[in-house]
Image (cartoon, rainbow, N blue to C red):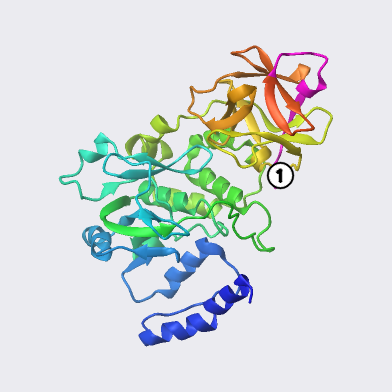
């Protein structure tokens, strides 16, 4: 029997029989259509009418010993506190448990983001440590990962649950985090509550969105979040995700009114008082000079990161006009970027893509009229082998068509 068939059986009749052993204490509800995890959580909040505190865990989690009491304790003292356990990483094949990276010497980290809205973790700093009396006290975090948290039920409803316009997956963790902080609540990470989480195995692309949702649901979610909560900071998101500038993201009038009626604080306040350390780790991005696909001039081939990061080679592949691994931007700091990664020179003049900060790999100039990228430190030009699908730098030669390029904007739909 196929793996998909086994999964369907396991989640239907077998699951229904399995939960019967708790005599109605465990309830199973099924949506009439695929709602995605965001709206499923809001629907779950409406179904869970008995408890005072709602706790959300992904299905692929394993709780640690004594995880529950420390998680709900802060809420018993202040109903506007939302708590998050410290999340350990469970290997998807070996099922071993390890602490996540990105923390301080004790493994403590705060939830963060870069300006393209990729989830990040930054070490717990001295300013936050000074607010605690003991090392094990809960500490403030600007954002949560989204899958694991506890919140007082009435407070969740007062916040309006999740934006009903967010679809399937993506951005909801930031939306609820900003809403909590800017509208009078607190978001705390709880060191004494540990929960393990299985992360996606390499190569897993996720399930495609259902037909009724349309294309680019995650990008639309990001745009809705920044348009409602980021105020003038949204310009930094659009600098990092220029393909979303003309994206139709739906009506946000009710959300804007919610902010006004609840006198929610500005994003500037949030950045100064709560998320002050994020620009130290992820500096605000410079403006873009050009952005789009980097197409080999008058051909149908484009530079493609092939999903490589942190030192992998970029290659040449057929242009698909879908952005993603073929979407790049060159900014005023002379960085040629894709998300938080920069193109730079690797071994043997190959061009690689690697993580960069604002002052790193500021090495490119794009001469649009000449269709040429120059690698400033060497004075060489961006070149390619159409036969080998390789990208490299070599001595500039105006007679070589392989050194001609054009950047064409790609608009998300």
Q: Is residue 132 above or below residue 173?
A: above
Locate residue 284, reporting x and y percent. 48, 30
Q: Residue at x 51, y 63 (%)?
A: 37
Q: Is residue 167 above or below residue 234?
A: below
Is the residue marked by circle 1 packed among few (<14), some (14-19), or many (20+) residues within 10 Å? some
Q: Residue at x 59, y 39 (%)?
A: 308
Q: Is residue 153 visible?
A: no
Q: Main secondary structure of the magenta part?
A: loop
Q: Give the SS element for disc 1.
A: loop
Q: Is residue 166 visible?
A: yes
Q: Is residue 79 above or below residue 360?
A: below
Q: Is residue 57 above or below residue 314?
A: below
Q: Residue furthest left?
A: 133
Number of dots carrying numbers: 1
Q: Residue at x 57, y 58 (%)?
A: 167
Residue 400 magenta: yes
- Indicate the quadrant where residue 62 lies: bottom left
Residue 363 magenta: no
Locate residue 155, reporting x and y percent. 35, 61
Boundaries of the magenta span: 394-413
Foreground pick, 64 / 159: 64
Quadrant of the image for the N terminus? Answer: bottom right
Q: Is residue 166 left or right of residue 263?
A: right
Q: Residue under label 1, please give it.
A: 322
Foreground pick, 253 / 384: 384
- Indicate the quadrant where residue 353 lies: top right
Locate residue 347, reporting x and y percent. 59, 24
Locate residue 344, reporting x and y percent. 59, 25
């Amino acid at each position: 029997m196929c793996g998909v068939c086994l999964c369907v059986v396991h989640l239907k009749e077998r699951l229904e029989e399995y939960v019967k052993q708790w005599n109605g204490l465990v309830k199973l509800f099924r949506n009439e259509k695929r709602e995605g995890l965001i709206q499923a959580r809001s629907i779950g909040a409406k179904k869970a009418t008995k408890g005072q505190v709602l706790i959300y865990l992904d299905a692929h989690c394993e709780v640690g010993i004594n995880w529950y009491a420390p998680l709900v304790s802060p809420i018993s003292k202040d109903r506007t506190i939302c708590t998050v356990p410290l999340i350990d990483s469970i290997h998807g094949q070996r099922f071993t448990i390890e602490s996540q990276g990105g923390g301080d010497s004790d493994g403590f980290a705060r939830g963060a983001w870069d300006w393209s809205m990729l989830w990040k973790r930054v070490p717990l700093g001295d300013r936050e440590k000074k607010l605690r009396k003991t090392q094990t006290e809960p500490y403030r975090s600007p954002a949560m990962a989204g899958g694991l948290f506890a919140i007082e039920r009435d407070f969740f409803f007062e916040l309006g649950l999740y934006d009903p316009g967010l679809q399937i997956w993506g951005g909801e963790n930031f939306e609820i985090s900003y809403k909590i902080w800017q509208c009078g609540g607190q978001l705390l990470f709880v060191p004494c509550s540990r929960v393990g989480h299985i992360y996606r195995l390499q190569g897993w692309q996720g399930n495609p969105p259902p037909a009724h949702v349309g294309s680019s649901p995650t990008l639309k979610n990001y745009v809705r979040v920044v348009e409602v909560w980021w105020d003038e900071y949204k310009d930094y998101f659009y600098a990092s995700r220029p393909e979303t500038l003309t994206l139709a993201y739906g009506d946000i009038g009710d959300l804007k009114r919610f902010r006004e009626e609840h006198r929610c604080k500005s994003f500037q306040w949030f950045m100064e008082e709560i998320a002050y350390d994020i620009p130290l780790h992820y500096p605000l991005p410079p403006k873009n000079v050009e952005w789009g696909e980097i197409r080999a001039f008058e051909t149908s081939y484009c530079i493609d990161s092939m999903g490589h990061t942190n030192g992998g080679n970029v290659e040449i592949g057929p242009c698909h006009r879908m952005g993603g691994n073929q979407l790049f931007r060159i900014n005023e700091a002379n960085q040629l970027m894709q998300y938080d990664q920069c193109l730079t020179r690797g071994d043997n003049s190959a061009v690689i893509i690697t993580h960069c900060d604002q002052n790193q790999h500021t090495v490119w100039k794009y001469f649009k009229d000449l269709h040429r990228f120059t690698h400033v430190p060497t004075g060489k030009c961006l070149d390619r082998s159409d036969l080998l699908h390789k990208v490299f730098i070599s001595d500039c030669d105006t007679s070589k068509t392989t050194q001609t390029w054009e950047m064409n904007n790609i608009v998300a739909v």
